[in-house]
Image (tube, rainbow, N blue to C red):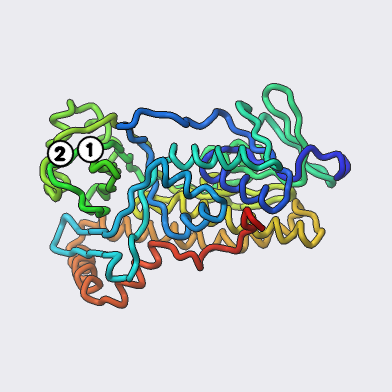
Amino acid sequence: MQTSERSHDVIIAGGGVVGGSLACALADAGLRVALIDTREPVTDWPADSIDQRVYAVTCASQTLFERLGVWEGIRQRGVSPYQAMEVWDAAGPGRIHFDAAELGEPWLGHIVEQRVIQAALLDGQRARSGLERICPAVLADFHVDPAGVSVRLEDGRELTAALLVGADGAGSRVRELAGIGIETHDYEQTAVVAVVTTDRPHAGTAWQRFLPTGPLAFLPLRDGRCSIVWSTTPEEAERLLALPEDEFCIELGRAFDYELGAITRVNARGGFPLRRLHAVDYVQQRLALVGDAAHVIHPLAGQGVNLGLLDVAALAEVVADTAAAGRDIGAHANLRRYERWRRGENALMQSAMDGFKWLFASPLTPVRLLRNLGLGTVDRLTPVKSLLARHAMGRAGDLPRLVRPDS
């Protein structure tokens, strides 16, 4: 397979938020990109509906979307900025409050529906001449040789490129076919998700209460409702999901200590098991993994998709620099820069989230006293609290350089 005969420079398996963003970034770098997606994103929905899956988009992720020219499309479809965050422990008086005004910022971040991001990215993909969407399509197999990578789709079509990227989620087919091992840990928790209506307004605040069984988050939505993520034991989650609506509302209100008054309504509930996952390798010859295909993290801090978007920015920069220098973008030696850049940072974040989970789940009296003392102390130490808040927000300066659409 000669370079001139390749159908594309990069093939991306997985058209979600991470894969779709990477496709736009690489197309902006002048590369010929094929994006394999199993289904077209939803682009139209009832005005009063809210997607079950929402993301807390940091400032760094917003900057990435701005550079890709899709943030305005996201904003027009509807975002929910939040100006404050309230975190407290159900087993004691410890509490901490973050406020954007104290940081001189207009907001701490935005709650955005997954489908909103994907619809805006679809517009961006269609506007890029160097990007081919292949949909619906499923990757069946691939073969790597010294000259490139050949990808076979389930319908028999074949594609060729210098680099294959797996952006196909936690159950990544690309990772499996490549034989890349994973390190996993079952949290023995299930996240119950739903959209709820509360008696009192959410006041543009993201709320999180740490219960003995796991964190309960209320994320503010633009229409006044909240999206909840209630992490609990699998048995308790099964029971909660089976409850009649009125009984579920009562139990949710009690678990949230009626911080926003009674829960008056709940829309479709869902649940998904929680586990940590980390790929042993992020790259091989002619192959790279990004997002959930490379790492899965506990959702207690809402950092999962943001870490994936930092992967996008880093890999796009590495590939763009390699191509600009006339070197092979699929060579393992060149891709290792991306792996060194991102694997350690993602592992550190995973460990930090595991530490928080253990700290707030521990029933030991000394640990409970320590965490409540810590929350109260940090809340009074403005410089420390500001440092934590800015780290959670993600700064534009944290984002690797990217080729802009107008460059």
Q: Find residue 117 and report its horizontal and vertical position in percent.
A: 47, 42
Residue identified by numbered label 1: 196
Inspect this view and state whether residue 176 appears.
no
Q: Find residue 43 and report its horizontal and vertical position in percent.
A: 47, 31
In the depicted structure, whether residue 154 falls above or below residue 4: above
Front residue (pair 76, 125): 76
Residue identified by numbered label 2: 263
Q: How far apart are marks 2 and 1 (CA)?
A: 7 Å
- Snapshot quadrant of residue 243: top left
Picture residue at 54% right of the left edge, 29% below the top? 40
Picture residue at 36% right of the left edge, 72% below the top? 387
Under tag 2, what secondary structure? strand
Instruction: Sort mark 1 into few (<14), some (14-19) or many (20+) by Cα contacts within 10 Å.
Output: many
Picture residue at 13% right of the left edge, 29% below the top? 246
Q: Do the residues labelled 2 and 1 touch (CB within 8 Å)?
A: yes
Q: Find residue 362 and report its horizontal and vertical position in percent.
A: 25, 57
